[in-house]
Amino acid sequence: MAEAILTCRDLAVGYENGRGCSDIHFTVHEGDYICVIGQEGCGKSALMGAIMGIEKPQRGTIEFLNHLTARQIGCLPQNTVIQTGSTVWEIVMQGCLHRTKRIFVGRKEKELAQKTLERLGIASLAKRKFTELSGGGHRRVLLARALCAAERLLILDEPAYGLDVMGRLELHKQIAAINKEDNLAVMVIGTDGMTDATHVLHLGDSQIFFGTKEEYARSAAGQLYAVGRIL
């Protein structure tokens, strides 16, 4: 049975404008692929920030289990500030540095960065400046950085944001392959993750649903989602 690595209990998260979500209860196991959905402003990004320790929950607890540490979590936020002039290689290496307490990278980290760039089909961009790339290139580079940081959990906020239809399909295909091949737990914010998800976390003013995708399809919320409504 897969180990539980993170659990949230009675969690409430929100924004300065007062919007957010309360009564959040769920557990992440190794190998899970959790799609997080809900209307804009319901607290999806705030939840991600709380798990990463960037934002403080309004109440409740987030517990790391079975030796999960913050250094084993990779994150791709929707909006990321990149230092002007940074190359693709330098950005991806930031993810490798996240794994270690050292201030420099060694052979192992360089091999991981190279392997990850090749896996995402962007090895040829390694020496390019990040600012020279298209929107699709930006998202793949930031995914590579997050993947290099993620040993046990990968959290992605609208990872295909700004991509065309084919680009979105290809990126989510890559994320699903990473989840299966590496047995890496994945949390994806956004409805695009629904196709490959094992579980669904549906948020509103309070948590609407958490369970397997099959259970969600049979639930009232899932049936509304199927006809184009997200509560």
Image: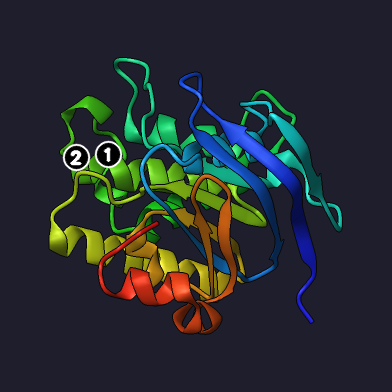
Identity of the residue furthest to the right in this view: 66
How far across and how far down the image is residue 156, in percent? Answer: 46, 49
Q: Which residue is mark 1?
A: 138
Horizontal side of residue 132 vs 82, given as left or right? left
- Which amino acid type corresponds to the residue marked 2 in the rendered image? Gly
Q: Is residue 53 visible?
A: yes
Asked whether the beta carbons under mark 2 and mark 1 sit within 8 Å of each other, the answer is yes
Between residues 27 and 65, which one lies in front from this camera angle? 27
How far across and how far down the image is residue 220, in percent? Answer: 46, 75
User: Helix, strand, or loop for circle 1?
Assistant: helix
Q: How is the image coloured?
A: rainbow
Q: Is residue 48 above or below residue 9?
A: above
How far across and how far down the image is residue 41, in percent? Answer: 41, 37
Which numbered disc covers residue 135? 2
Which numbered disc covers residue 76? none
Q: Label 2 vs label 1: CA separation?
A: 5 Å
Number of dots carrying numbers: 2
Q: In the rendered image, which quarter contains the C terminus? A: bottom left
Q: Quadrant of residue 210?
A: bottom right
How many residues crowd mark 1 within 10 Å: few (<14), some (14–19), many (20+)? some
